[in-house]
Image (tube, grey):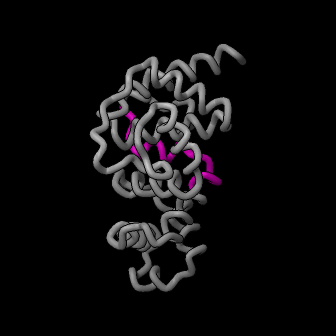
Amino acid sequence: MSFQELNFQALTAARLWRSLEPEERALAARAYFAHAWTDPSARREGELAIARALRFREEAVRKLSLDKRAGYLAKAVQPADSLAGSLLLAFHLEERRALLAAFLDALEIPHDHGMIAEDHALQAPGKEALVRATEALDARFPAREVDVYLASLLALDPGSWEGVGDVLEARRSASRAAR
């Protein structure tokens, strides 16, 4: 399924993962395994998924190089929502942190380098605020990166980011009309 075919009203992390380009999945898988911030239990979930997909023992997967594990995770595993969510988080926190920070700045949401402050009670931004923040992102980042980020917000926390679905639909309609 391509990104353009996603149903934003029923979006899940696993569905979004399947719509990513191979290069995006590779970057996400590498970020998932490469950095210490990843919870060890989350890493184990990725290693177990690789072991199941390839019919390897879990110990054998742990012995693989980071590049091999990331490659298998990106190409051979169809992750469930939990793992797909962890992969999307890793991807954005490692590869697209500037985009996260710019979006939160545009919405005037307190954050630390793209991570919403733990003591901040996030309230769903209104549609106008989301449109303005998205326009600010469009001025600085490629449209594909903006779309994937917005879809990730919606897939990972639909309650806080419910208006993002409408913004994504409007962006998709405008893109189709421009063709």
Say which of 124 and 80 sits in front. 124
Q: Is residue 30 above or below residue 68?
A: above
Q: Main secondary structure of the magenta part?
A: helix
User: Is residue 20 covered in magenta?
Assistant: yes
Horizontal side of 45 relative to 97 (left or right) equals left
Residue at 44% across, 78% down: 56
Horizontal side of 120 relative to 142 (left or right) equals left
Residue at 52% across, 40% down: 149
Which residue, as the protein is rendered here, is positioned at the far top?
A: 177
Residue at 52% across, 28% down: 133
Residue 138: x percent and y percent?
64, 30
Residue 13: x percent and y percent?
40, 45
Q: Is residue 27 above or below residue 39?
A: above
Residue 11: x percent and y percent?
39, 35
Say which of 79 and 164 sits in front. 164
Q: In which quadrant of the rendered view does residue 123 lie?
A: top left
Horizontal side of 172 relative to 165 (left or right) equals right
- The part of the chain drawn in magenta is 10-25
Q: In which quadrant of the rendered view does residue 10 lie?
A: top left
User: Is residue 172 covered in magenta?
Assistant: no
Say which of 148 and 131 sits in front. 131
Quadrant (top left, top right, bottom left, bottom right) of the C terminus: top right
Residue 145: x percent and y percent?
61, 40
* Count of numbered marks: 0
